[in-house]
Image (cartoon, coloured by chain):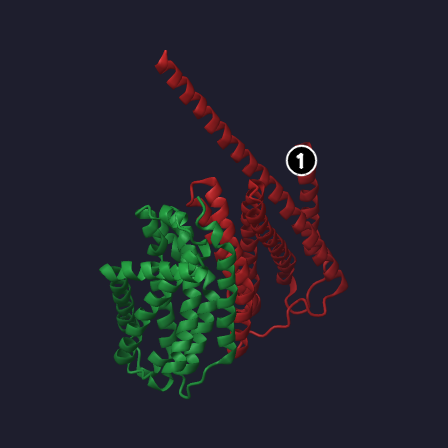
Amino acid sequence: MKRYGIANIVTALLLFFAGYAALFIAPDEATMHAIQRIFYFHASCGWAAMEASLVVFAANVAYLAKRNPQWDWLAVSAAEVSLAFWSVVLVTGPIWAHPVWGVWWVWDMRLTLTLILWILYVSYLILRTLIADPERRAVFSAVFGVFVFLGVPLDYLSIRIWRTQHPQPVIFGGPGSGLDPTMLKVFLYCCGVMTLLMILLLRQRYHLERLRHAAEELRLAGEERMDARVSGAGKS
Amino acid sequence: MGTARAAAIVFGREVRAEMRTRELLQTTVVFTVIVVVLFNFAFEPSVAEARRFGPGLIWITLLFAGSLMLNSSFAKEQANDTIYALRMAPASSFAIVLGKTLANLLFLCVTEAILLPVFSILYDVSMLAFLGRLALVLLLGTFGMVVVGTVFSALAAQARLRELLLPLLLLPVLIPLLFASVEATAGLFADSPALDRTWMAVLVAFDVVFFTASWLLCDYLLEE
């Protein structure tokens, strides 16, 4: 547990420095100025969310193959963490978009796909809350998770075709094109820190899931003992 | 028993059970017709607008109807405890899921065969010029919907709030299918009807991907 404490403090310091770097070290963007700095958090959270989503899929497949409950704990932990990061992406995006594009939301490729993913992870977590039996919950949510993952490339494809057929409401040369070297360094640093934060959250959430499982086992064992004692008392 | 034969038996059972009461079909058909009628009160569309928004309306209606109708596919096995008989049957889980999928496909196709003429008459949109191509789009779109829907029906059947849960699981996963079906149908509803190859390819890809997935994963649906 002590190792976790140190990792927490280190990540907090690194995050603090990421904020400093994004606000003071990265140079001012020519047209968007200060508001562009949100991009260091927005895009790096998207990056961490994507990593966590991949963990969900890998854990789902591993659970179906091995039937080891630990994979299920990892899947639900990663799903919650990825939902948290996707939510940050969905909130910081419009904050940036409103002053720059003049609207909070456009049905652009990446925005639409992010929103769909967010909805899918919410559905995944709701499904989990509605199945009581732990093993069935693990199997069914893993099956759903695989279906969800298989759908993502098709979503990507459809939105791409759809977007090229319909006029684009806003045209922008994204901040990724021709990035200043300092900007790139700060951005990569932020991505690294967010990944670290993601792993840390994932570990904490996994630990919580394991404790929950252990508590459930203890409760069941206790009930069994109680039942045995009651039936034993009845006999004598 | 071979998969095809077992699937045919399950299919026959589903259809026979439905034909005894026809309650699922009549409820679904009436539901879709009501939605199409409500469309008029909500938007009061002109003929041009009905052509423009018709494909979206038809597919949204079918998606909602499907997500309500497919619930009973496995929920009724749960309610009658016939799920145990299905598990014991000397048939692979794929055969059972396939038989149910095909039966659901038939039920939704019957619904469409009633819904489309109603839509056509109420909104003065003639579909005779592209009927064959429209049937192909409907078949591919409906197939994708029932493939995913039948699997999810098995998932939702053992959860709480299953009637609400199934649409929640099904609709977001069907987004690419909705895109492709609506756009392909819209291509046919245009002034010079044309079948969009790209969207047909997306539909076929959707069907193949999820049919394979249901084949690979159906063993997990019926286990104890």
- Read off the chain for label 1: A
In percent of the image, x 44 and y 69: which residue is there?
B178
* Quadrant including the C terminus of chain B: top left
Instruction: Label the green chain with its letter.
Output: B
Please name whichever residue, B52 or A188, is drawn nearer the observer in this view of the structure. Answer: B52
Tell me: residue A78, above or below residue B188.
Answer: above
In percent of the image, x 53 and y 55: which residue is there?
A146
Q: Is residue B149 left or right of residue B25?
A: right
- Residue count near mark 1 (Cα–Cα under 10 Å), binned few <14, some 14–19, many ≥20: few
Q: Secondary structure at mark 1?
A: helix
In percent of the image, x 66 and y 50: which residue is there?
A195
Outermost residue toward the bottom? Answer: B192
Q: Residue B41's image quarter?
A: bottom left
Please name whichever residue, A47 or B149, is drawn nearer the observer in this view of the structure. Answer: B149
Instruction: Label the red chain with its letter.
Output: A
Residue B82 image offset from top left, x and y in percent: 33, 48
Judging by the rendered image, the residue that carries numbered circle 1 is A5
Q: Amino acid at mark 1?
A: Gly
Q: Is residue B179 left or right of residue B43?
A: right
